[in-house]
Image (tube, rainbow, N blue to C red):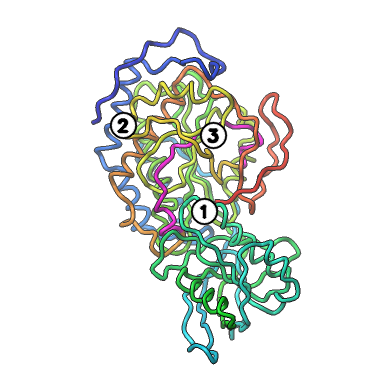
Amino acid sequence: MISLLAAPPAPKAGSVSSPPPATAQAPGPTAAQLQMAERLVGPALTEGHAWARLAELTDGIGPRLSGSEGAEAAVQWAQRSFKADGVKVWLEPVKVPHWVRGEEHAELLASEHFRARPLTVMALGGSTGTPSEGITADVVEVSSLEELASLGERVKGRIVFFNHDMKEAEDYGRFSVLRGLGPSAASKAGAVGALVRSLATASLSTPHTGMTRFEDGITPIPAASVTVEGAEMLHRMLASGGSARVHLVLGCKTLPDADSFNVVAEVKGREKPEEIVLLGAHLDSWDVGEGAHDDGTGVAMVMEAARLLARQKPAPRRTVRVVLFMNEENGLRGGKAYAEAHAAELPHHVAAIEMDSGGGRPLGVAFRAGEGAPALVQPWLSPLVALGAAKIVSGEAGGADLSPLGPAQVPMVGVKVDSSRYFDVHHTHADTLDKVDPEALAKSTAALAWTAYALAEMPGLLARPTAPPKVPAMFAPPAVATPAPGAPAAGSVKPSTH
């Protein structure tokens, strides 16, 4: 159990309906509340429950793409686990897409300059399959959607190869548009297929999958990721003035939508149960690897936070609700369904945290909220000093599954973790339990549990944000029937990607 800082002065009696000015020092936790921190942080670090739960999900169930048997098994497992922890739980129905992968292989055909050789590829989610005999076409390389548009007739009948130079985790947002929207743009320009360089910060001939989306009215074409090594080889051959001709076979297809569920659980608040602090993670994963970092670690952390909070007396002032969203990876149906089903409650969602950046060590807390949020929360971060996470950090808070809550101006809080190596294994066969550090997972679980308690217990409320959230470009948030009091009408949002 870690040693906590001494309690700051006790807050004045009475609740605070709005945060203090950004320059004011808000009251921090009392001595009794810091004792609660000991009961949350200590067990999160020492009991190993988050790690054990992650092992159950990853090794026990494995891949869990929406619509699959693995996804259904994960829903039932999560419901059983919450019940075993004494946490109230229920299921909320969601209709989800059901895409299946099938065979996938590619070959760089021989020419007068080089011998034929295989290309290691992985179909992108949402891709259509090729004819059984595959497709064969010359390759044309582009590095942006603008460059693609500039090629005009040169794209017709070809396979478009989207290349980029992602090196760091921060590059993902810049280049993921090539995977998400590139194949659709290629089809519109007359291409017969698309290859996208894997969005990776490391590679041992490891292809990375992910979603692609075809615009309405655009004929889907076969689309696959190619390894970093394969992409570099294609680039060298094309840059030397030569040509490259590829044979591609994909067996993927889209089946009718399937029935599934969001798993919702909560610890009821003692004084203001109608005010909700939401903790979210997505239960689905891609159909490769075990979905350990993406998003098994997030699932384990939010479930453990609920378990720890449920056994504390007294309960926090506000309700802490956990949502394990279904279908974040290839449709965001769970996030949209939650926003629609709980539209009347959204003005009473006082904070929301999404854990979907892997299981690295905690770094600090970020906000998407109105003025005064850092000043209100900073005094409550003292129990996280020993974890190295008692800082207000820059960066975006929220996440893909929380983006449909944006029109209701729900304040977003981010418990930031070290994601510098996250994209080494993201969306690959290598996203397995052994890639997760148990100590880092325990520390981030502890940081989340205390942050959730602090948001549910502190007298004041975070001011609601005025700026629209960044949301994945491929996913349009649903209209929310009941906006926050005084909120402007929902407008367009700036595109981003997960």
> Quadrant location of residue 150?
bottom right
Residue lying at 48% horizontally and 27% vertically, measured from the top left = 319
Q: Residues within 10 Å of mark 2 (few under 14, many from 20)?
A: many
Mark 3 is on which residue type?
Met
Expressed as whole percent of the image width and height from the top left, the position of residue 122 reads 50, 70
> Quadrant location of residue 183?
bottom right
Name the secondary structure under disc 3.
strand
Q: Are marks 1 and 2 in contact (CB under 8 Å)?
A: no
Left or right position of 148 against 369 = right
Expressed as whole percent of the image width and height from the top left, the position of residue 168 reads 46, 54
- Separation of residues labelled 1 and 2 (CA atoms): 33 Å
Q: Which mark is residue 171?
A: 1
> Quadrant location of residue 448?
top left
The residue range painted magenta reads: 404-426
Question: Which label's residue is closer to the chain start, 1 or 3?
Answer: 1
Q: Are marks 1 and 3 in contact (CB under 8 Å)?
A: no
Q: Are marks 3 and 2 in contact (CB under 8 Å)?
A: no
Residue lying at 46% horizontally and 34% vertically, measured from the top left = 393
In the picture of the structure, the residue carrying the numbered disc 3 is 412
**Furthest-top residue in view?**
13
- Separation of residues labelled 1 and 3 (CA atoms): 23 Å
